[in-house]
Structure formats: structure tokens, C-alpha cells
Amino acid sequence: MATIRKRGTSYQIRVSCGTDIYGKKIINSMTWKPDDKMTTRQIEKELNKIAVQFEEKVKKGVTVKIDNKIKLHEFCDIYLDMQKKTLSPNTFHNYQKVIENYIVPALGHLKLIDVTPLHIQKFVNALSEQKANYNTKSTYLLPSTVKAYFIVLQSIFKFACKKGFLDFNPSSLNNIDMPKTPPVHTDILDEKGITALLNCLEKEPFERKIIIHLALCTGCRRGELAALQWSDILWDKKQIVISKTAYHVTDKKGIKLPKTSSSNRTITIPDYMICMLRQYKKYQIEQQLFTQTPNQYNMLFTDKHGDYLSVTALSNWFKHFLKKNNLPYIKFHALRHTSATILLVNGTNIKTVSSRLGHTNLTTTNRYLHALTDVDVIAAEMFEKKLNFNEMGQKWDKHA
């Protein structure tokens, strides 16, 4: 029910909308000033009519009261609270750290409505000049890192606009100049690199052999591999179902649904991989009996306690494995790039490759097309051998 208060020559209409996340009452209000020529009865009639219309708008969510005094650091708390169930555990943790360490110290003191594109441009420039604390060398934050931090800030302002706190998004890329990002170098193993890797892998435990072979055969992300359960193996069809990904935030590990629906996919694997998996399953059961450590969640890969395998631990092992065997350093993710390249080089169409990798669109898969340059060279060499007139004993004028 709307309440009406007389304020001098004007009237304030107030409508209660419950409480906010902090238990504070939410009051929507508007001010109406009658025409000087209106009679008391006309004012009363018009005032009641406007009050009813305003209350209906409030109930429908057309009108929302916004606290113009709210500061950015206060709104960040609201943003994180609202996004906690929407963002993945890893993403939420990363966003929280960026907000705490960078956004709030730089911009948190400003009122949300007072933040301008100039404030944000200065924030981006300051990030570009900030020393990195993840490297022992005296280097600045990479342009890609600056962009990643800016995306968090941009997400906050998009949320503010969506919820009616702002009419204008000051973080729009049309208003901000970002540092130029150099082309991303994609590490891909060639045939010799793959052979060297697999030869060194023979000295590693069985589960490590399996995980590397799966990475190369399927092109799965490390989180997808770590989240595989035995129920995901379709033995008769020689396929693996990819429907979840592993996460590790501080001391908490688990599996969750993937970020996009395109990440849900079924991948066919070669016969040798099925044979290796059968042997590995038998090996895993024997190890469990020997160590008396149960596989708590029926996982393909576990830690030494039978719990989820940490993706961080997997990357650390791979880095140590390469160093121990004097192999060139590559990220674990490079195995995914290598898998895609092997498929393209051997004639698999790009749509199939994109589907196996779980890409949302073909644009992402296009990054691997440079690998086809090698195939083009091979094709040219084939023509040299097959069609060269000298090779075929035919005469032709080289100077024509």
C-alpha cells in the first residue's frame, strides 16, 4: 500500500518493497507537485490516481529505487553475493581476488554512479605499469593479464546496468583503450616431439601414461580428464563421454558441470586406447586392494588418498616430467593443441575437430589452421615428384 506525505508544495509517494540482502527496507519513492490552479479536491483525486499507478509499476519491477550513495566497494559485495551460484568455483575465486587486490584499492572509494570512463582508463593504465608478483624477474603485468582483470571490472558494471543501478556503462570498450596484446604463441608438438614424449613416458606410472595418451587422443582439457569416471567409458562403442570438469580452489576439490553446453560431447577413441584402459582398470583395482585405499568417486584418476585428482597437481607433475627428461617446456594444454593439429594434418574436417574439442564456434578452432601449412608444403613436394617433366623424362623449355 502506497503512503503519501506532504512536503511543502509537493507530495512524496512511497511504496515498500520488502528488504535487501542485508535486511534493510527497500523503499521506492517519487515526488509529485500539483498545478497551482488545481483545487484541493482535484489534487486529492489526481494524487490517489498517481499513487495507484506508481505502486503498480513498482510491483511489476518497472520502477526500482537505486541508492545513489552506494560506493563501488559496497556494490562489489552485492555483485559477488549474487554471482556466487552463477560463476564456477574457480572463476568466483579468481574474481574475488581481483576485486580485493586491484579493483577495490583503486576504485572502491568512489560512488558507483560517479565512476567515469576516465577513472577506468586510469585504472587500466595503472595496471599496465604495475610490477608482476608472479615472476621473480622485474617485469610488468602482461597485457593479457591486464585484459583479464579489466574483464572482471567490466562484468561488475554490466551487472550494475542489468539490475538498474546504472543507465550508462562506463567500462564499455568503446570508451577504453586497452594495451595491445601480442599474438599468442601456440605450442604444438611435431612428430619427433610426440615420439620423444611417449618414449620418456614409458618410465612413468601407468596412470600417467594413460592420462597423456588420453590427452593426445581426445584433445580434452586437463579439468575434463581429471573429472573422468569409469561410467563415462562406453566400452562397446569405443567412446568417452565428456560431461563435467574438475576444479580445485584452495583446499576444496570437486567436479562440476562445464561452462558451456558445447563442452558436453562424446568422443570416439582408437582401439589401442580401449585396450590400455581395460589394462589400467585392472591395474587400478589391484592397487586399491594392495594399498587398501578406496576409489571414493569411481574416478579414472585419483590422488594418493583416493580423492579427486587436482588439476594443479597434474600440471606440476607434467612440468617436472619434462624437466626430468630434458624435454622442451610446454604447458599441459599444448597436448590439446597437438591433438587438434594431428587431426587437421591428417585430413579431418574442421567442424569435426571443433566438435571433438568442445569449442563453441569454429573461430576458436581456426587457430590451428596454420598447421596446414606443413601439409601444403608436402602437397607441393608430391607434385614435384609426380608431375615434374624432368622426373618423367619429358623435354620442356626452362627459359620459355
Image: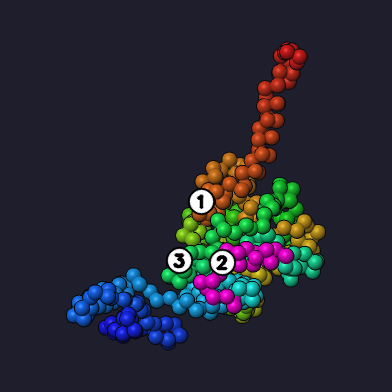
Secondary structure, mark 3, is loop
Q: Nearer the viewer, mark 1 or mark 3?
A: 3
Secondary structure, mark 1, is loop
Q: Is residue 320 left or right of residue 356?
A: right
Report the residue marked by disc 3.
167
Residue 258 appears anywhere in the view: no
For the record, the magenta segment spans 108-129
Q: Position of residue 177 (x, y in %)?
A: 62, 57
Mark 3 or 2, nearer chain start: 2
Please tell me which residue is depicted at 50% across the width and 64% down the height of the picture. 169
Q: Which mark is residue 351?
A: none
Q: Nearer the viewer, mark 1 or mark 2?
A: 2
- The three-letter amino acid code for the residue at tag 1 is Asn
Location of residue 198 by image quarter: bottom right
Marks 1/3: CA–CA distance: 32 Å
Secondary structure, mark 2, is loop
Please tell me which residue is depicted at 52% across the width and 68% down the height of the picture. 157
Report the residue marked by disc 2.
116
Report the residue marked by disc 1.
361
Marks 1/2: CA–CA distance: 34 Å
Please tell me whether the stretch drawn in magenta is mainly helix, strand or loop. Answer: helix
Location of residue 163 by image quarter: bottom left
| Residue 71 within the magenta-colored segment of the rendering | no
Q: Nearer the viewer, residue 210 or 186?
A: 186
- Residues at badges 1 and 3 in contact (C-beta under 8 Å)? no
